[in-house]
Amino acid sequence: MKLQSYLETRAYPAREFGRRLGVSPAAVARYAAGKRIPTPDVMRRIVVETEGAVTPNDFYDLSPGTPERPRTVVTFEIDETLLEEAERFGTDLTALAEAALVDALRAAKLSQWRERNAEAIREANQELAENGLWSDGLRLF
């Protein structure tokens, strides 16, 4: 279900929904209008707050009939209490695991990029410290 439909059918004000998510009403309006995709953290909160009625796929227009990338079944152990609580809240564990994996991979790629570019970053910082910005003499403030 699209977020806009969820909010309309439940007469859920954007201000209250945003307060529950920890985001501004303007952010909720952008999410609902499809102008912005929530961050993985906000996405998880939306899934929990809507009790699974709104999922990450709803923001990407992926319906069950839409061809998806190949999927692999993964088995892992999880604390039973956490699983029961997640089920009570209607948490989509697959979406949550994928979002967490995307976050972890993004962080790993950023770390790798920083390592590969450490020398260039150090040189750029040294150049800046020695010579300043090219526009330093042009500032009017």
Image: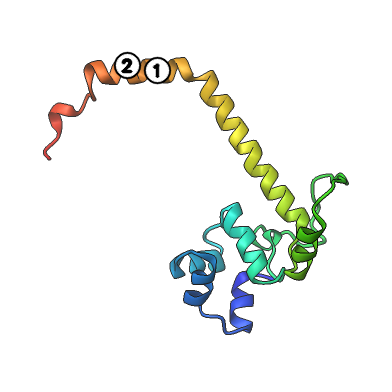
Residue visible at 54% across and 64% down? 31
Question: Distance from label 2 to label 1 (Cα)?
Answer: 6 Å
Q: Residues within 10 Å of mark 2 (few under 14, many from 20)?
A: few
Residue visible at 50% across and 75% down? 14
- Label placed on residue 122: 1
How was this image coloured? rainbow
Tag 2, which secondary structure?
Answer: helix
Residue 81 higher or lower than 11, as above or below? above
- At label 1, which amino acid type do we have? Arg
Q: Residues within 10 Å of mark 1 (few under 14, many from 20)?
A: few
Residue 110 higher or lower than 3, as above or below? above
Tag 1, which secondary structure?
Answer: helix
Camera-side residue: 35 or 56? Answer: 56
Residue 64 higher or lower than 97, as above or below? below
Residue visible at 47% across and 19% down? 118
User: Does the residue at mark 2 contact the one at mark 1 (Cβ under 8 Å)?
Assistant: yes
Q: Quadrant of residue 83?
A: bottom right
Q: Where is residue 69 in the image (x, y as percent from the top left)?
A: 80, 46
